[in-house]
Image: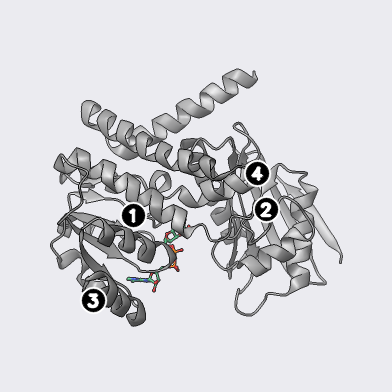
C-alpha cells in the first residue's frame, strides 16, 4: 500500500479537504470536513463514478456542508463532513481499496467519522473498520447500528404527524391520502407505518415487485411513476430521488404538505417560496430524514436505544417549532431552518471562544 494524503486548500468556511490516493489498490478519495464546531464531523462515504476530481470536490463539499446542518438540527454533538471515493461501485471495488480508505480516515485521528452512503455496503464499511475505529454504520457488535432506514422512516412518520396537525388541524392520519414515491428501504417502512395509522396509501416505484407488495399487503393504490403530479393527494412523501420539486412539478402538486426522506428534494432554493405561495407546507428534507444519522450517532456515542428515541422525537418537536415560526413570520420553513442552524452554530462558537 502506498497511501498518499494531500491537504488541499478548502473553500472559505470549510475546515479541511484531504485527498487520498493509493496506486496499488486504485483508491482515489476526498474527505471534506466542513465544521467541527459541535463535535467531530460525521457523514457517509459515497462511491460514485465522477468524471474528474473537480466534480468529486464539488459534491463532497456540498454534502459535507449539508451534514453540518443535518447534525446540528438533530442535536447530535457532531459536526459535518463527508467523503467520496471516485470509481464505479459495480466495477472498481476491492478490499484493499477500502483498507486504504480506512487508513486515510484513521490519519484524521477522530476528527471525521465515516459510514455507508450511496454505493457503499456494510461489507465495504467492515473493511474500512479493520483500519480505523472511526468507521460506523456497522452490523453486529455491542453498538453496531446496522441499517439506518427504519429510523429514517420513523423520523419521517413522526414529522408527518406534526405537519398534519399544523396543516389539517389533527395529527390523526386516518383516511389522509398520502402518496409515497419510492418504496425502497425507507419508503416501504414508511408505507407500513402509514398503513398501520389508517392512511389511504397511494404508491409508486419503478420496481414492480415493491408496488405489488404494497398493493397486496398495505391496500395501496399503485400509480405509474409519471403520474405523481397528476394525482390527488393530501400529503406527498418523496422517498426516491432528489429535485422532484421543481418549477414544472410544483404548480401541479395537489398536496398541502410535503414530508419525505429523499435528499435534496428542492431543485433550487427558490422552490421553497413557490411552495409557500401555493399554500403547500414543506418540511425540510435534511431535518425530516435525520433518523439515519441519529442511528449512526448512537453508535458513535455508544448510546443505548433511549438516545435514538429521544433524538427522533426531538426532530419532530423542532419541525413543530419551525412551522409555528414560519407561519408567524410569513417565511419559508427552509429559511427558518437555516436560521435555526446558524443560531446553534453561533452559540457553539461563542461557548468555545
Ligand atoms: P433505496 O434505493 O432503497 O430506495 C429508493 C427507491 O426509489 C427504490 O425502490 C427505487 O426503485 C425507487 N425509485 C427510483 N426512481 C424512481 C422513480 N422515478 N419513481 C419512483 N420510484 C423510484 O433508497 P432509500 O435508502 O430508501 O432512500 C430513499 C431516499 O431517502 C434517498 O434519496 C436517500 O438519499 C434518502 N435518505 C435515506 C436514508 C436512509 O436511512 N436510507 C437517510 C436519509 C436520506
> Residue 240, can we see it?
no
What residue would you read off at disc 1? 260
Picture quadrant of residue 323: top left
Whole-Å distance between the Cαs marked 4 and 2? 8 Å
Seen from the viewer's position, the closer of residues 46 and 246 is 46
Residues under numbered marks 2 and 1 in contact, where contact means CB atoms less than 8 Å apart:
no
Residues under numbered marks 1 and 3 in contact, where contact means CB atoms less than 8 Å apart:
no
User: Which callout, 4 or 2, points at the residue further toward the start of the chain?
Assistant: 2
Q: Nearer the viewer, mark 2 or mark 1?
A: 2
Report the residue at 58% width, 71% height from top: 49
Seen from the viewer's position, the closer of residues 133 and 64 is 133
User: Left or right: 117 with respect to 224?
Assistant: right
Residue 142 badge:
2
- Ligand 1 within 8 Å of disc 1? The answer is yes
- Ligand 1 within 8 Å of disc 2? The answer is no
Position of the N terminus, as image quadrant, is bottom right
What residue would you read off at disc 4? 302
Q: Nearer the viewer, mark 1 or mark 4?
A: 4
Q: Nearer the viewer, mark 3 or mark 4?
A: 4
Residues under numbered marks 4 and 2 in contact, where contact means CB atoms less than 8 Å apart:
yes
Seen from the viewer's position, the closer of residues 140 and 89 is 140
Q: Please, is residue 98 above or below residue 14 in the view? A: below
User: Which callout, 1 or 4, points at the residue further toward the start of the chain?
Assistant: 1
Amino acid at each position: 500500500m502506498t497511501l498518499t494524503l494531500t491537504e488541499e486548500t478548502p473553500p472559505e468556511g470549510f475546515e479541511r479537504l484531504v485527498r487520498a490516493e493509493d496506486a496499488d489498490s486504485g483508491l482515489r478519495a476526498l474527505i471534506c470536513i466542513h465544521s467541527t464546531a459541535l463535535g467531530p464531523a460525521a457523514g457517509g462515504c459515497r462511491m460514485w463514478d465522477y468524471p474528474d476530481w473537480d466534480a468529486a470536490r464539488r459534491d463532497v463539499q456540498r454534502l459535507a456542508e449539508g451534514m453540518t446542518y443535518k447534525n446540528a438540527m438533530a442535536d447530535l454533538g457532531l459536526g459535518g463532513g463527508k467523503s467520496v471515493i471516485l470509481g464505479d461501485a459495480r466495477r472498481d471495488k476491492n478490499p484493499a481499496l477500502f483498507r486504504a480508505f480506512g487508513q486515510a480516515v484513521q490519519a484524521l485521528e477522530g476528527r471525521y467519522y465515516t459510514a455507508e452512503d450511496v454505493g457503499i455496503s456494510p461489507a465495504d464499511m467492515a473493511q474500512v473498520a479493520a483500519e480505523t475505529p472511526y468507521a460506523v454504520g456497522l452490523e453486529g457488535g455491542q453498538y453496531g447500528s446496522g441499517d439506518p432506514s427504519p429510523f429514517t422512516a420513523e423520523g419521517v412518520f413522526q414529522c408527518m404527524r406534526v405537519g398534519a396537525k399544523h396543516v389539517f388541524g389533527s395529527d390523526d392520519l386516518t383516511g389522509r391520502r398520502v402518496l409515497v414515491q419510492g418504496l425502497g428501504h425507507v419508503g416501504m417502512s414508511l408505507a407500513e407505518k402509514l398503513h398501520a395509522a389508517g392512511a389511504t396509501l397511494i404508491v409508486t416505484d419503478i420496481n414492480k415487485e415493491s408496488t405489488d407488495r404494497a398493493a397486496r399487503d398495505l391496500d395501496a393504490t399503485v400509480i405509474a411513476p409519471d403520474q405523481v403530479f397528476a394525482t390527488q393527494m393530501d400529503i406527498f412523501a418523496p422517498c426516491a430521488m432528489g429535485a422532484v420539486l421543481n418549477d414544472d412539478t410544483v404548480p401541479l402538486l395537489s398536496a398541502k404538505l410535503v414530508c419525505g426522506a429523499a435528499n435534496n428534494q428542492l431543485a433550487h432554493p427558490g422552490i421553497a417560496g413557490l411552495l409557500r405561495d401555493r399554500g403547500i407546507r414543506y418540511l425540510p428534507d435534511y431535518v425530516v430524514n435525520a433518523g439515519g444519522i441519529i442511528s449512526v450517532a448512537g453508535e458513535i456515542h455508544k448510546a443505548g436505544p433511549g438516545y435514538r428515541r429521544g433524538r427522533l422525537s426531538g426532530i419532530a418537536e423542532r419541525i413543530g417549532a419551525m412551522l409555528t415560526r414560519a407561519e408567524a413570520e410569513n417565511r419559508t420553513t427552509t429559511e427558518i431552518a437555516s436560521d435555526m442552524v446558524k443560531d446553534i452554530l453561533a452559540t457553539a462558537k461563542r461557548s468555545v471562544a
